Amino acid sequence: MAEVILKNIKKIYPFGDRKEKKELAGRTNLTVTEEGVLSVHDLNLTIKDKEFIVLVGPSGCGKSTTLNMIAGLEDITSGDLLIDGQRVNDVEPQDRDIAMVFQSYALYPHMSVYDNMSFALKLKHVPKEEIDRRVKEAAEILDISEYLNRKPKALSGGQRQRVAIGRAIVRNPKVFLMDEPLSNLDTKLRNQMRAEIIKLRHRINTTFVYVTHDQTEAMTLGDRIVIMKDGLAQQIGTPQELYGRPANLFVAGFIGVPQMNFFDADLIKEENGSWYVKLGDSRIDLPADRCERLAANNVSSQRITLGIRPEHIRVGEGNLSGTVDVSEMLGGAIHVHLKTLGSSAIVVVQTLDIEDPRKLFADGAEIRYEIMPRHIHLFGKDSGENLEFPPVR
């Protein structure tokens, strides 16, 4: 159990030669400096003792690099990494008192489950009785006691991942690091293992740092989530904060399934201090508390991007309309893809009281809808930042 602090952490991968520098400089998906390719830039994060932190973002955003720097598998270009108050930038991985679970199970195929789990303890010359106690205790927590004499090839993917986690548990580390541990599992197993990790977290009660590209994993597992893009932390907050108060368009579009809808609109301030949004030919008056936040942030009338989640649109009434492009029937709900306002949008409609949703939302059907004012999100057209909840500088 430990507090982990990252202060102004930066990671730059140096160029191999001038030719590589020239080639990489032309790639728009990379941040290239004179020193090399910038992978993580000025990351500041305090992970509290026993907290479950999730690093999430698209491929190449720097989340796995950050995890590897905490583990000691990657050098830190600049900044300070502290575990339990001790600066560990130059401490060897084996001396950091951390345990890591990888995407690949990395089990020894010729060893039994018991031997895989006990191997690191044997190397440290832990007494045999203590090894036996720790292994059996971890096996019981993970419900793999009956597999201790089996080889990894005789186990399913989910069972192998439990063994990999068990191998980390027996070490009683200060910090658990997990790098996309569920990505090799099918959907059903992934859902099961996600629930198991939640239960595991409460049973062993230690500090977790978890990397994933799956925002559903991030939302269900994390006490707080760090959303990364291009080496930068876009927002750090609880799942509820990220869902309800996204800092910018990237976070808004990344969190939520289906993702948030975006429309071009105008934010207009009236002389009486109230605000409304002009969306197409529709006027959306904003509640008083939202007007107060806009005034407190000195927001002026401007062109904006309006965001609204698919579940916050009501169909069947309202002064907005659209044409059904395609519908996806998902049992208790139907996802209706609309052509509207010169763009496209997705609406989630619960089907419990609808007799024939496929007919009602057939391709080409015209439907009316309204946007719920309390749930819209307002982003600056140029900055892309949330106008009500701007990021702290």
Image: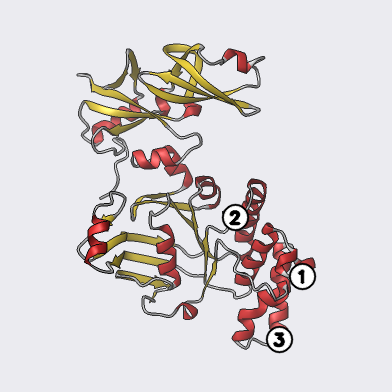
Q: Quadrant of residue 124?
A: bottom right
Structural distance between the alpha carbons of marks 1 and 2 = 21 Å
Q: Is residue 30 above or below residue 143?
A: above
Q: Quadrant of residue 149?
A: bottom right
Residue 383 in view (yes/no):
yes
Structural distance between the alpha carbons of marks 3 and 2 = 33 Å
Q: Which mark is residue 248?
A: none
Residue that mark 3 sits on: 128
In percent of width and height, residue 251 lies at 39, 42
Residue that mark 2 sits on: 184
Q: Are marks 3 and 1 in contact (CB under 8 Å)?
A: no
Residue ID at (61%, 17%): 358
Tell me the kind of residue under disc 1.
Answer: Arg
**Position of residue 144 in the picture relative to residue 305 (left or right):** right
Q: Is residue 161 above or below residue 236?
A: below
Helix, strand or loop at mark 2: loop
Helix, strand or loop at mark 3: helix
In percent of width and height, residue 175 lies at 51, 69
